[in-house]
Amino acid sequence: MTDPRLVHQQYEWEPRIWDPQAASDTLKPTFTSPPGSLPPWLHWEDGAKLVGTPAEPSPPMTITAIAEFVDATGTKCVIDTSFNVQAVLPHVLNNPEAIYAQVQAQALAQAQMQQQAAAQANYDYAAQQWNMMATDPNLSMGQSMPMQPV
């Protein structure tokens, strides 16, 4: 299940750790996420609260929260949980078809950007080969370049 968040509205999540053998106020967890895993608009505030304001719609993304704390027996513990978040426009919030259309449009845009990057890489490679042939006096058009032993 994806948790929709509204674009341009503050998002806050303050996770809690529950230990049946300890009072909640005695646990002092520090929360983090794996490096580079959070979207640019989201961050941990003081290691206790996940906060941020999405500036634009986004596809669903998985957020992982890692908690480090000492339990009631004095043992250092590390636990984690993951959930999905998606930034949506207000008119999309209660409209599953609009959310699906938004995700599809973003996926299409991303696929087009990847195709453009691949085409540019192919063009750059062809230009590099052409320049090599044009500057090598031992090659003429239609000749292949000699293979070098590995």
Image: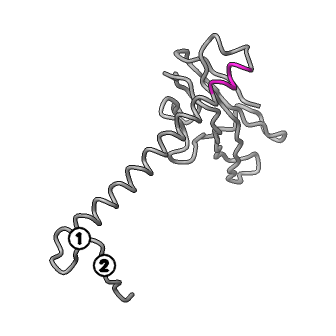
Part of the protein shown in magenta: 97-102
Image quarter of residue 48:
top right
Classify 10 Å Cα crowding around label 1: few (below 14), some (14-19), many (20 and above). Answer: some
Q: Whole-percent x and y of residue 91? A: 64, 10
Q: Is residue 143 toward the left or the right of residue 6 in the image?
A: left
Question: Which residue is tagged 1?
Answer: 133
Q: Please determine whether, in this image, residue 94 is positioned above or below residue 128.
A: above
Q: Is residue 21 toward the left or the right of residue 55 in the image?
A: right
Question: Which residue is tagged 2?
Answer: 145
Residue depicted at x 83% and y 41%: 21
Residue depicted at x 59% and y 21%: 11
Q: If the image is split into quadrants, where does the N terminus sit? A: top right
Q: Magenta stretch containing residue 98, yes or no?
A: yes
Callout 2 amino acid: Met
Magenta stretch, overall SS? helix
Residue depicted at x 35% and y 54%: 123
Dot 2 or dot 1: first in sequence order is 1
For the residues labelled 2 and 1, say whether their Cβ atoms are less than 8 Å apart. Answer: yes
Give the CA separation, mark 2 to mark 1: 8 Å
Q: Please determine whether, in this image, residue 1 is positioned above or below residue 30.
A: above
Residue 9 versus residue 31: which sits nearer the camera? 9
Q: Secondary structure at mark 2?
A: loop
Q: If the image is split into quadrants, where does the C terminus sit? A: bottom left
Q: Please determine whether, in this image, residue 32 is positioned above or below residue 75.
A: above
Q: Whole-percent x and y of residue 65? A: 64, 41
Q: Magenta stretch containing residue 112, yes or no?
A: no
Q: Secondary structure at mark 1?
A: helix
Q: Please determine whether, in this image, residue 105 is positioned above or below residue 115.
A: above
